[in-house]
Amino acid sequence: AQEQGTSPFPKHQETIKMDPSDQKFFTVIDYVIFAVLLAASMGIGLYYALSGGRQRTTQEFLMADRSMGCLPVSLSLIASFQSAVAIIGVPAEIYTHGTQYWFIGCAYILGLFIPAHIFIPVFYRLRVSSAYQYLELRFSKAVRICGTFTFIFQMVIYMGVCVYTPAFALNAVTGFELWGTVLATGLVCTLYTTLGGLKAVIWTDVFQTVVMFAGQLAVIVVGVQKTGGVADVWRKVWEGNRISGLDLNPDPTERHTFWTLGVGGVFLMLSLYGVNQAQVQRYLSSRTEKEAVRSCYMVFPSLQLALALSCVMGLVMYQEDMFIVCFPQMVIYFVMDMLHGLPGLPGLFIACLFSAALSTISSAFNSLATVTMEDLIKPQYPAMTEARATLLSKVLAMSYGLLCLAMAYLTHLMGDSVLQVALKIFGMVGGPILGLFCLGMFFPWANSIGALVGLCAGLVVAFWLGIGSILNRSTRPLPLECGTNATIAIQTAFNNTTLSQPSGLKRFYSLSYMWYSGFNCTTVILIGLIISFLTGPTKEEDVMPGTLYPLLGKLFCFLPEHLKKKLCCVTPLGQTVSERIDLIAKNLATFIYDVFAVE
Ligand SMILES: CC(C)(CO)[C@@H](O)C(=O)NCCC(=O)O
Ligand code: NA
């Protein structure tokens, strides 16, 4: 196993299988633990297929009867976007580049506070079933359909990455059958999602999140013990330069700084926790608005814990004399090496990895089935019976499960650093969607044409930037923070010759991927506003009540009242049902008045 350490730059595709003699790290107990994970998930699916309303309505299958408490919802919220990609991608990142990435935790503050106080109240009070229904209420049917398709595109690519990553990493190290693993996870997940609906998805998320934390914790505890205690781990990572201070470099092309992670990360968090259907659906499945807000708050400590565990895992793995660049599959290699001879623990870690993956793809299947049903099919066939709609939703959940397998194959053909790929997808496709919702909620003047053109322009710019960055990668390689003098010398020489400030388009292409969400969101808002003003801005009183949030009025609260009224939206969000009815009545009155005033 030590031979692997001699090559400082292993190729990405190179597999690092252990010796056949080393292959015995899985005992019967390990297989049993993994089987228990799959069986328990299936059991939860079956339980919800046979109890309660037996999944006979779309309200139950897609919205969990809007009856969930805040604890399961909050654990399910963190499970949605914490997949095997994060479990093995974050330690690899920390190992290679140091602890700078940890500062993304700063983004969780605003990234959860804003959804809790702006997005959740708007969605909850409109009583929508899909986030995209909002777009029709605020803009038009066309905007809703475009938003829906963009979301489907995003989640379908993402779930391919999620199901493929753990299978690939496991195969690279232990020789576990790659496509067998993909098939097993994809099919088990499809089955319990189709049988048990959102209730099963949320409760398996709870169980799987606990397994995920337990697996990471076990690796850390064993790792610290094997290294010789906390002090020894600390000395090693300190001497290896892996502890990073706050990097305040304002350069937007710098991959990870406080600004890209702490500010750019807020937009990433908003696109995931504010407007992504998988999360909005969980907020809406809560019993009350208060519980939804509380569950969003409870995500904060759990997500910090998840981040801390995966960062600490990267530090524990760090051995100065080993690899300099750590590719995700090596994380499995280290873990397997470390847990060797401790029956049950390798199995627990594998269960942790697949729990993370299962909880993410099940959320994807259910949210995709929901938007396809609510946004694309139901509006076309309003007379469809409930029984038929529910059956169709199940067929949809299953079809997306099978599509996921096909997407895993596509991911197999791409092959790249997984954490960055996942976060780029969130930024390139999720960023414009976030922009669309912000345009609608915060800017009363935005109209439907502006929204459509803004979304399309945002997506075009996003893909121009994303593809440009891939094609231009060779000109600006990732900075390697190497532990040895020789490599530092090489790196310095490299910096001086080829890494002089890129200019023009090249500089645009090298924008840090952590800014993608914020940048693409801003493009949609700016273009959307320009087009809206050119084509005739909407008047605030013509906008459907409850779809606006007076963000500008709050930001410019220092302005005198009449200026505020003229410049910004100041209508408060209806607090109660009667207030909302009042608002609608008032709007109707103004409308009738306008009609007669024209006469
Ligand atoms: C969504 C964040 C950024 C929140 O820390 C994190 O969970 C993450 O890095 N996710 C990567 C994508 C994934 O795990 O599938
Ligand atoms: Na997950």
Image (tube, rainbow, N blue to C red):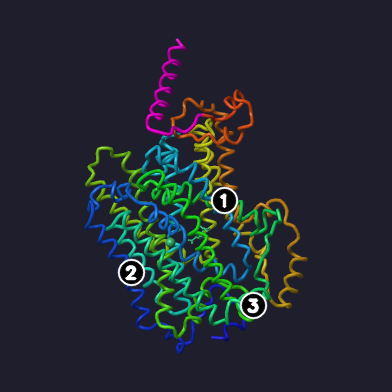
Magenta: predominant secondary structure element?
helix
Crowding at dot 1, Cα within 10 Å, few <14 / some 14-19 / many 20+, comes out as many
Residue at image x 23%, y 46%?
388
User: What range of the chain is rendered magenta?
Assistant: 571-599
Label ID, residue 236: 3
Disc 3 marks a residue whose amino acid type is Lys
Residue 177 point in image, percent of width and height = 39, 76
Q: How far is mark 1 from mark 3, CA to CA?
A: 32 Å
SS type, badge 2: helix
What residue did someone put label 1 on? 266
Say which of marks 1 and 3 sits in front. Answer: 3
Disc 1 marks a residue whose amino acid type is Val
Residue at image x 25%, y 47%?
57
Residue 571 point in image, percent of width and height = 50, 29
Disc 2 marks a residue whose amino acid type is Leu
**Quarter of the figure with residue 580:** top left
What residue did someone put label 2 on? 38
Residue 519 point in image, percent of width and height = 60, 47
Quadrant position of ligand 2:
bottom left
Q: How far is mark 2 from mark 3, CA to CA?
A: 38 Å
Residue 348 point in image, percent of width and height = 41, 74
First-in-chain label (1 vs 3):
3
